[in-house]
Structures are given as C-alpha cells and as structure tokens.
Amino acid sequence: MSIFCLGVNHKTAPVEIRERLAFAEKAVPHHLTEICGIGNISEAVVLSTCNRVEIYGGSPDPAAALDKLVDYLEGHFSVAPGEVEFYRHEAEAAAQHLFEVTSGLDSMVLGETEIFGQVKSAYATALSAGTTARKMNKLFQQSFTVGKLVRTSTRIQQGSTSVGSAAVDLAEKIFGQLDGCRVMIIGAGEMSRTTAQSLLSRGAKSIIVSNRSFDKAEELAAELKGRAVRFDDWESCLDEVDIIVSSTSAPHAVVKHEMINRVMAGRRGHSLFLIDIAVPRDIEDEVNTIDNVYLYNIDQLQQIASEGKTRREKQIAVCRGVIEEFLKEKGIEALAGLPEGRSGGASERNQPEPSSRPLTNP
Amino acid sequence: MDDLYLILATLTFLGGFILAAVSLRSEGPGRQGLNIPIAVVGLIFQCLFLQERGELHGRCPITNGAEVLVFVSWSIVIMYLALGKAFRLSLLGVFSMPMVFLFQLIAIVYLHFADPGPRPPVSLDPWLELHAAMSLLAYGAYGLAGVAGVMYFFQDRQLKSHHPGRLFYSMPPIRYLADALVRLLVIGSVLLTIGIVAAFFMKVVPSVSHLVISGAVWLVYVLLLSIHSAKRLPPKRLSLSSIVAFAFALLTLSFL
C-alpha cells in the first residue's frame, strides 16, 4: 500500500475554484467516510483551508485511487470534468509535499505558522472520524516533527513579510515584549487600523486614537478597545505613549521635530517608535536624528518587508534540505514498511502511533 | 602545562567567535545554542590554567599583568554564564569572546617572553584574597557592561539606518541591552565596593598608588550610576560611558 496526495492550492487554482472545492467544516467527517469507501482507499485526511484543498490517503493502487477521487470531487463540488487541474503526488513525493505544507514552504506567506495548526486540526478530524490508520498516523506525526524541526533549525521565520509585521518586529526589537507598550494612532485609516491590530496581537495596550473626524476616532477606538481623543488634543497625549502610528491625509507634517524633542526630554531615556504610513508624510524626517527616537516611513517598512521575503525565499533550499535529510534518514521507508491500514481490521484504524517510537521499527 | 591550558582556552574562544560569526552570516541553520557549551569549555581551560598558576604561587594567581588579564577574562566568562540567560542576552557571549581572546593572547605572549615565575606570598591573608577576587570579578561585570554598550550602539545604528542587516534579527532588543548594562554596572560596583572594603582589613597596607587607582575606578562607576539614577542618562550616552569607563579601568590595571 502506498500513500498519495491530491489537491489544489493558491498557486495552481484561483480562488473561484478553491472556494467551490472547499469542504464545509461540519461535512468533513462525512466526506472522509465516503472517500474511504471509494475503490480501495483505506485511509484519508482532508486538509481544507482558504489557500488549499488537499486529500491525503493510502491505497494499494494509488493511481486508480487518484482517478476515482477526482471523479468524486467533480461529482460532489460542481466542478466540470477536466475543469480543475489537480496535482497528484504518490509515495515519497506525497510525504515531501505534506512536510513542505506543514513547514509553511507552500504557504502564501512563506514560513507562516497558521498552517501547522490547520494540518493538526485536519488530522484530528480524520482521527476522530476513524479514517486514519498506521500510514496516515505515522505520516502526519512525522509531518509535525518535520514542521517543528524546519522552524527551529532554519531561518524561515526570520524577517518581516508585510508592512504590518515589519512595524511590529521593529517595535519588538526596540521594546522587547510589547506587553507594557502604549500606542497612539493619528488618523483613523485602514493601514493604521491594521498596524494597530498587529501591535495589539503582540500584547500592546492602551490604544489612543485621534482623527480629524472625532466620530471615526471613536469608532476605531471602540473596535480596538482604546480611547478616542480630539484632533486638537493629541499632542498633549504624546507623553503617554511609546509607539505612534500616523496616517493622516494632511498635506504637511503633523508631527514636528520640536514636539518630539520636547517630549523626549521628559521620557527619562525611554525610546519612542514612530511609524509614518502617510503619503505625503506626517512626521518630519529630522525626528529620526533625536536620540532614542526611531522613525520609519512607509517606503522603509516596505523595503524591510521586501528584504524579509527575499531572505525567506533563500531559506527554501535550506528547509528542503532538512526535509530531504529527514526523509532519507527515517521517512518514507518506515511508512512503506508499515502493515496495511485495513488488513489490521477496524480496531487497528484510528490508533495514532506513539511519536517517540522509532520510525525504522514500526 | 599551564601555558597549554591557556592556549587551549584562547583557541576555544577564538573558535567560538568564528563559529558564531560564520553561523550568523550563513543562510543555514543558526548555531547559537553552541555559545554556552563553548564558553563552558573555555572556562574549564581557564580554571585549569588558574589552578596551575595558583599552585605555582601558593596563592590567588594575580601576581603579574598576564595573570590579571586571564583572571579578568575568567570573570567576564563567569558573568556571562551566570547572567546572560537571565538577561535574555545569549549573544553577549559572542560579542565578549573577541575581547577575551585578545586579553588572553596578550597574556600568552607576555608569559612566553617575560614570565616572572613563582611569587610565593610573604604571609597568607584571606582579606587580600577577597580584595583581589572581588575586584577582578567586578572588572568582569564592567567588561560585560562595556560589551553590552557596544551591542547597544550596534543595534541603535541598525535601527537608525533603516536597513537592518542579518545580525539585527539575532540581536536582543535595545531595551534589554540598556537594562542589562545598568544591572551589570550595579553588580560590578557592589563587587568592587566589597573588594575595597576588604582592603582595609588586609595585614599589609596597600600602597597609596594602589588605593588611589582602585578608588578612582570605584568613583568613576559610582558617579556614573549616581548621575544615571538622578538624571536617567539616555541609553546611548550610558553605553558610551560604560565603554570609556571600562577602557579607563583596564588602563589602571597596568599601574596596579
């Protein structure tokens, strides 16, 4: 018996196709049972996220199983025959693909960690639906080991990949943990909201929102569980904050060098991080010359994000090396040596292998 | 045998620094986890060297400039191993390795060409041993504070330049560096104070120049901490001051 993988992802199919193929969360156990009834498919796991729909399984005749699986998907998901080009992987290629997915190498944002939890959840669903046996149990447990190994032994997660994450990463390089950091937003635009949410997600607290239209400021402050201040009063709040995100539509600088110079005199050596995402810029460039003040504008943040992406792309080869080495040492041979999933009977299914068990001695 | 231990310790720190530098620059997996084991191996060789020299003299081996430099290096490594993790500064070890290497290289050259040989004590004095040990441990803390200052400058420059390099992502946040720097200055000053107090109980009264020099180093650091405590010196100025102060402290060693 061999393992296989069939699917589409954000690289091979547009969202219009992916949304039609997406498995409703509640219906996954039912589909899994149906898939295990197709031909000689003995095990199955469905991974359905916004960026991919993939089915992993085990069968003595994977080529035939894959054809029948395509027919099943076309029959159940309003897809015309031949409309979707599914990718198919068998044996080692299927294992390698899953390992790359779990490691975040196949994700839209390289190295992102959300996919790890999604794969875990997909496996847990199949496990509770009773559609996994030794091969899938071993394969997925291996994928979790590899996912962790890749993230800890390479730099795939290093560097920012978006303006928001660049701002947050810089803030952490200045303040460390953001738990005690206070944030002020000047201008209640979409970019400010996104950046503030990123900062909040890493622990920043007490958001102050100021906007020319006070209603908008109140609205955003309510959303971010912060406090709104009138636009005429934001300057008086400068002493209270560690991070300022500015994105007004003012045609001239709003935050001036003298203002920050005055504020810094009272900060007793504490740093101030200013993020200017407005065009034209809101914060005078000279502000960056003040000690302990770090000013970044939209171009500089975009540049960091772009460099971060390039850095992560360079890590793909290193990560693949880790995966290949893992596969060579204790991967697919161990899976191939496992007894048939179904031959052990129903009682053999659904029993995950202890992760500590040596892979070469299944 | 003692010179062999010192050479091995020196090579260990050089190797550790090269390994860390290559690892930080490479695209491959990071090897920061090796910093502590390497520092421990280097420390073992340092201890073996100091033990041999101690047996040679029959007392704490700080009888000449080379031994003092090795003792200061040993203090720096001890401080890093004791506090690096607590201060969340694993890279402090990497940055201090070149300094330790340099100190020990000078010691090797000195001992090779001008080893003054055994200098047994006239009489054993525990207060003298305490004075010497505490003072040199204080130098270790001050040395590490200087290294933290250099790291602060580096990270500040990276942040100000808007083009953070690869090392930027492996470095600790500047707030942690600034906090660690102050703590190391406090630890160093407490140790030096104990060392100076111990000097008043010594059987042999220290020379005036020794007292003046020790007092000057103590005064520089206590003044620095007092000004910081009263006025909250900006971290950049404090970093610069800690580097300059350590350079001064090192200079005074040559007069002791």
Image (spheres, rainbow, N blue to C red):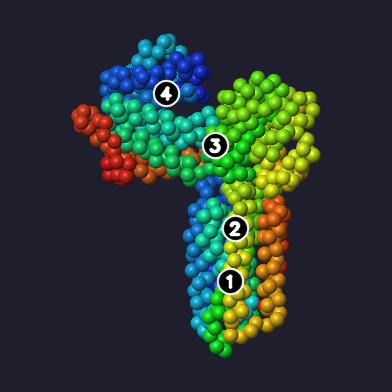
Asked if marks 3 and 1 touch (Cβ < 8 Å), the reply is no
Q: Which residue is mark 4?
A: A48
Rounded to the nearest angstrom, the CA distance separating label 4 from label 2 is 51 Å
Front disc: 2 or 3: 2
Rounded to the nearest angstrom, the CA distance separating label 2 from label 3 is 27 Å
Mark 4: few/some/many CA within 10 Å (<14, 14-19, 20+): many
Q: Which residue is mark 1?
A: B194
Asked if marks 1 and 2 touch (Cβ < 8 Å), the reply is no
**Dot 2: what SS?**
helix
Instruction: Give left or right: position of B22 versus A292.
Output: left
Mark 4: which amino acid? Ser
- In the displayed structure, would residue A10 be above or below residue A353? above
Instruction: Give left or right: position of A216 versus A21.
Output: right
Res B61 → quadrant = bottom right
Residue B183, labelled with which disc?
2
Callout 4: residue from which chain? Answer: A
- Front residue of B114 and B228: B228
Res A343 → quadrant = top left
The residue positioned 41% from the left and 10% from the top of the image is A78
Front disc: 1 or 4: 1
The residue positioned 60% from the left and 39% from the top of the image is A181
Res A279 → quadrant = top right
Q: Which residue is mark 3?
A: A202
